[in-house]
Image (spheres, rainbow, N blue to C red):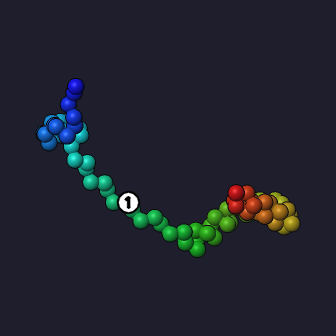
Amino acid sequence: MGLHIDDLDAETLTKLGLGAPSPQPKAKPKAKFLAEDERRHAINVLALISKLSQAERRKVLKRALEVNDV
């Protein structure tokens, strides 16, 4: 038959590494996506497709929006 975990005292549980769980560190609040971040990312995306014509960029960005909706 074996021992049940509830039958062990606190000292034994601690030695086994099964003592009370240590308090979890508080999660840092998630940084907001600021307008400046949005602007920087938009410039980075446009830089990648800068060699395309405006019509081609429009098509690529439209396709990217469609893919993003999936």
Query: Which of the two residues, 29 or 2, is positioned nearer the viewer here?
Result: 2
Q: Which x, y percent locates residue 59? A: 83, 63
Which quadrant does the N terminus fall into?
top left
Which quadrant does the C terminus fall into?
bottom right
Residue at image point 77% right, 63% down:
61
Snapshot quadrant of residue 19: top left
Residue at image point 86% right, 66% down:
55
Q: Which x, y percent locates residue 8? A: 16, 37
- Which residue is situated farthest in the top direction here? 1
Mark 1, secondary structure of its residue: loop
Residue at image point 50% right, 69% down:
32
Query: Which of the two residues, 53 or 14, is positioned nearer the viewer here?
Result: 14
Query: Which of the two residues, 10 or 44, is positioned nearer the viewer here?
Result: 10
Left/right of residue 68 with respect to residue 28 in the rendered view: right
Crowd rating for badge 1 (residues with CA inside 10 Å; few <14, some 14–19, many 20+): few
Snapshot quadrant of residue 60: bottom right
- Which residue is situated farthest in the front direction here? 1
Q: Is residue 24 visible to the viewer in this orientation of the structure? A: yes
**Residue type at mark 1?**
Ala
